[in-house]
Image (cartoon, rainbow, N blue to C red):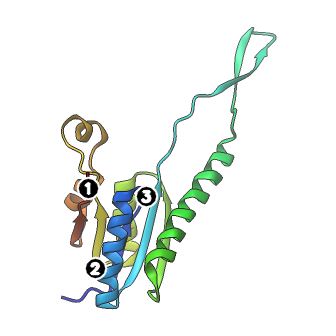
Amino acid sequence: MMIKKILIGIDDSKYAEHAAEYGFDIAHKFKAEVGLVNIVEPVMMPQTIASTDPLMSMAMPGTGIEEMELLDIQKNQSENIVDRAIKKFAGNIQVTQFHEYGSTTDGIINCAKEFGADLIIVGTHNRTGLDRLLMGSVAEHVVRHSEVPVLVVPFKEIV
């Protein structure tokens, strides 16, 4: 088995940081390239009322915080997440960055194809029961739909 390219899915959580550390350790051992992917999921924001139309006496929707402003903020956060992981774990490993917008699970799978990954590494939040039902499981979806092996790295909190 040759592992030349590893895609690591990360977000701004301790679970993802643990998975990134694990993934970079494997990459160092195999002298593999790493792709780091952070997915920005769309945020639904209620529209604020900007003004009232005098002819129809109806409220006209305003945008409050501009959508483009929000996208810029999310893009900057995504870049910071990836940059922190690179500084902390990469060393001399070549890293390709992916900043996608949309579904996390589909984004990871699509980036793995684009990168030509031999292995995908994701962390798990260890959700169970109702939390898992309501939030879904990114790791499970990636495992079920990936065309390459997926390593799911659990994180146990020390209490």
Residue placed under numbered mark 3 in the picture = 11
Amino acid under label 1? Ile
Q: Is residue 152 left or right of residue 110?
A: left
Could you tell me if the residues under marks 2 and 1 are in contact, i.e. CB atoms within 8 Å? no
- x, y percentage for residue 99? 51, 64
Among the 4 quarters of the image, the one containing residue 58: top right
Residue that extends furthest to the front in the rendered view of this protein: 159
Q: CA distance from mark 3 to mark 1?
A: 21 Å
| Amino acid type, label 3 | Asp
Q: Which quarter of the picture shows residue 66? A: top right
Q: Amino acid at mark 2?
A: Asp
Q: Which residue is under mark 1?
A: 158
Question: Where is 34 relative to 70, above or below?
Answer: below
Q: Residues within 10 Å of mark 2 (few under 14, many from 20)?
A: some
User: Based on the displayed image, in which of its 4 quarters is residue 89 positioned?
Assistant: bottom left
Q: Nearer the viewer, residue 109 or 124?
A: 124
Give the answer, above or below, for where 71 lies relative to 30.
Answer: above
Front position among marks 3 and 1: 1
Which residue corresponds to the image point at 26% horizontal and 38% vertical from the top-left?
Answer: 131
Tell me if label 3 and label 1 are in contact, CB under 8 Å: no
Q: Which residue corresponds to mark 2?
A: 118
Q: Nearer the viewer, mark 2 or mark 3?
A: 3
Q: Which mark is first along the chain, 3 or 2? A: 3
Query: What is the number of the mark on residue 86?
Result: none
Earlier sequence position, callout 3 versus callout 1: 3
**For the N terminus, which image quadrant?**
bottom left
| Label 1 element class | loop
> Which one is earlier in the sequence, the residue at label 2 or at label 1?
2
x%, y% of residue 124? Answer: 27, 56
SS under mark 3: loop
Give how far across and how far down residue 125 sits, in percent.
Answer: 29, 52
